[in-house]
Image (cartoon, grey):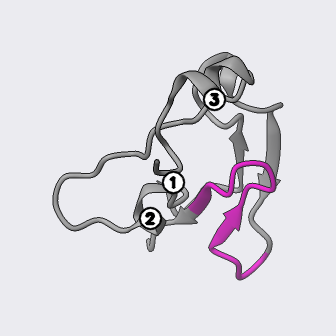
Amino acid sequence: MNAFSTDTASCENNQVKMPEKSCSGTCSASALNAPEIIHVAADTDSVRCDGGHGALGHPAVYYRFDEGVDRVICGYCDREFIRSAS
């Protein structure tokens, strides 16, 4: 029995086994979990992140781009916001 199979013994013990994510092609586990990268305009001073996915996201947070810094990373979901070059 592999780690993702379900059998009656697992169901009787209320253990839920999630199936592996399938990936066609040659993607790796890190590619399946890679954080989203969002490009914003070069003159953007701040960004708002709520994790997306509506109610499945996270509380809205706001980040400012410091002087000379062109990327910020959300502390909740690891989304990366990158200011585009002028």
* Residue at x 70% of width, y 41% of height: 49
Q: Are marks 2 and 3 in contact (CB under 8 Å)?
A: no
Q: Nearer the viewer, residue 22 or 57?
A: 22
Q: Amino acid at mark 3?
A: Ser
Q: Amino acid at mark 2?
A: Ala
Cα separation between marks 2 and 3: 26 Å
Return the x and y of residue 40 as percentages of the image width and height. 51, 54
Which image quadrant for residue 10?
top right
* Residue at x 74% of width, y 55% of height: 74
Q: Main secondary structure of the magenta part?
A: loop
Q: Which residue is mark 3?
A: 10
**Residue 25 to residue 11: above or below:** below
Return the x and y of residue 7 as percentages of the image width and height. 51, 28
Return the x and y of residue 64 as percentages of the image width and height. 79, 58
Please give the range of residues in magenta: 67-81
Tell me the number on the disc at residue 36: 1
Q: Which residue is mark 2?
A: 29
The number of discs equals: 3
Q: Quadrant of the C terminus?
A: bottom left
**Residue 40 to residue 72: above or below:** above
Return the x and y of residue 32 as percentages of the image width and height. 43, 56
* Residue at x 64% of width, y 70% of height: 71
Within 10 angstroms of label 1, few (less than 14), some, or many (20 or more) residues? Answer: few
Cα separation between marks 2 and 1: 15 Å
Query: Is residue 37 shown in magenta?
Result: no
* Local secondary structure at mark 1: loop
**Residue 4 to residue 57: above or below:** below
Nearer the N terminus, badge 3 or badge 1? 3
Q: Amino acid at mark 1?
A: Glu
Nearer the N terminus, badge 2 or badge 1? 2
Q: Nearer the viewer, residue 6 or 19?
A: 6
* Local secondary structure at mark 3: helix
